[in-house]
Image: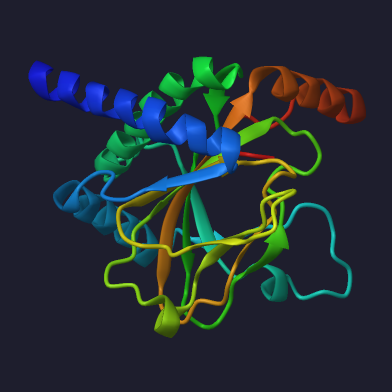
C-alpha cells in the first residue's frame, strides 16, 4: 500500500504540474479521463445509483427568486449533499480524498489559499430533456473558487443523449464542450470567468460536484452574511 500511495501521489503531482495548472491559468478549465480507473469508478457509480434509488435525491434549488419562471425550465437536476462518511459512500469518500489531494497540489502554483470545500453534490438529470441554463457558479463573491465535477456515465453518446456541459470562457472567442463521460474529472474556475450550461439530457446523467473555497473571499462572504442576518453562514454546502 505505501508504494501504491506514493505512486498515486507522484502521478497526481505530474498531472498538476504538467497539465492542470497550465490549463487553468491559460484556458480556465481542464479535464482528465480515466481518473479513478474502471474498477473504482464502477463502485462509485453503484453507490451513486443506490443514493438515487433510495429516493434521497431532491430537486436542485435556485439561488434567489425567479418570479414567473418555472424552476424546471432553468434547472432540471435532482441532488443530494453527502460528506462521504455516510454508510455506503466509501468509494465516494475515496474519490473526494483524491480530488482533495489534487487541489492541495495545485494551491501553491495557482497563488490561492484554499482551506475548505463544500460537501459533495450528487446529481442526476433524469433524462427527460431537462438541463441547466447558462449560469455562473459564483457570481457574487461567495468564496467558491474551483469547481470539480466527476462524471459517471457509461457508454454516453452526446449526439443521442445530449447532456454536454458547454463552457463560455471569458474573453475567449470559442466555447468548450465537455461530454459527461464515465470516469472524467473536470476542473474550472467557479467565478465569472466561466459561465456554463448543461444542455438537455435524454438519458440519466450522473455527476458528483465539489467546490473549493478561496479562504479570503469565503471569510468576507461569511462576514457579509452575518451582518445581514445576524447568524453564521451555512457550513459545508455551497451557498
Which quadrant would residue 111 be assigned to in this image?
Answer: top right
At 50% from the left edge and 38% from the top edge, which residue is drawn?
23
Name the image quarter holding the C terminus. top right
Residue 124's spot in the image, x, y percent?
A: 46, 64
Give the side of residue 228 with respect to residue 236, left or right. Answer: right
Along the horizontal axis of the image, is 150 left or right of 111?
A: left
Residue at x 48%, y 30% (from the top left corner): 21
Q: Nearer the viewer, residue 14 or 64?
A: 14
Question: x, y (%) of residue 150?
Answer: 40, 50
How many marks are shown on the rendered structure? 0
**Residue at 69% over, 52% down:** 172
- Horizontal side, residue 203 vs residue 232: left or right: left
The answer to whether any part of residue 56 appears in the image is yes
Q: Is residue 44 left or right of residue 147?
A: left
The correct choice, above or below, for 22 with respect to 36 in the image is above
Residue at 58%, 77% (x, y): give it.
130
How does the figure colour the protein chain or chains? rainbow
Which residue occupies the foreground of this view, 234 or 130?
130
Residue 211 in view (yes/no)? no
Q: Nearer the viewer, residue 175 or 141?
A: 175
Amino acid at each position: 500500500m505505501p508504494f501504491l500511495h506514493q505512486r498515486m501521489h507522484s502521478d497526481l503531482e505530474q498531472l498538476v504540474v504538467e497539465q492542470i495548472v497550465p490549463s487553468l491559468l491559460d484556458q480556465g478549465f481542464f479535464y482528465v479521463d480515466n481518473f479513478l480507473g474502471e474498477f473504482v469508478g464502477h463502485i462509485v457509480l453503484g453507490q451513486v445509483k443506490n443514493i438515487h434509488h433510495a429516493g434521497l435525491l431532491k430537486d436542485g434549488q435556485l439561488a434567489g427568486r425567479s418570479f414567473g419562471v418555472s424552476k424546471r425550465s432553468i434547472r432540471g437536476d435532482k441532488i443530494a449533499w453527502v460528506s462521504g462518511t455516510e454508510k455506503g459512500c466509501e468509494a465516494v469518500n475515496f474519490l473526494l480524498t483524491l480530488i482533495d489531494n489534487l487541489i492541495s497540489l495545485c494551491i501553491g502554483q495557482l497563488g490561492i489559499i484554499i482551506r475548505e470545500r463544500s460537501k459533495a453534490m450528487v446529481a442526476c438529470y433524469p433524462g427527460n430533456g431537462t438541463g441547466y441554463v447558462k449560469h455562473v457558479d459564483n457570481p457574487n463573491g461567495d468564496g467558491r473558487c474551483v469547481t470539480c465535477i466527476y462524471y459517471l456515465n457509461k457508454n454516453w453518446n452526446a449526439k443521442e443523449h445530449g447532456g454536454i456541459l458547454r463552457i463560455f470562457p471569458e474573453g475567449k472567442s470559442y466555447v468548450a464542450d465537455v461530454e459527461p463521460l464515465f470516469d472524467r474529472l473536470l476542473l474550472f474556475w467557479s467565478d465569472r470567468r466561466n459561465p456554463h450550461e448543461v444542455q438537455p439530457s435524454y438519458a440519466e446523467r450522473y455527476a458528483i460536484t465539489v467546490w473549493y473555497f478561496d479562504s479570503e473571499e469565503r471569510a468576507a462572504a461569511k462576514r457579509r452574511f452575518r451582518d445581514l442576518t445576524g447568524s453564521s453562514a451555512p457550513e459545508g454546502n455551497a451557498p
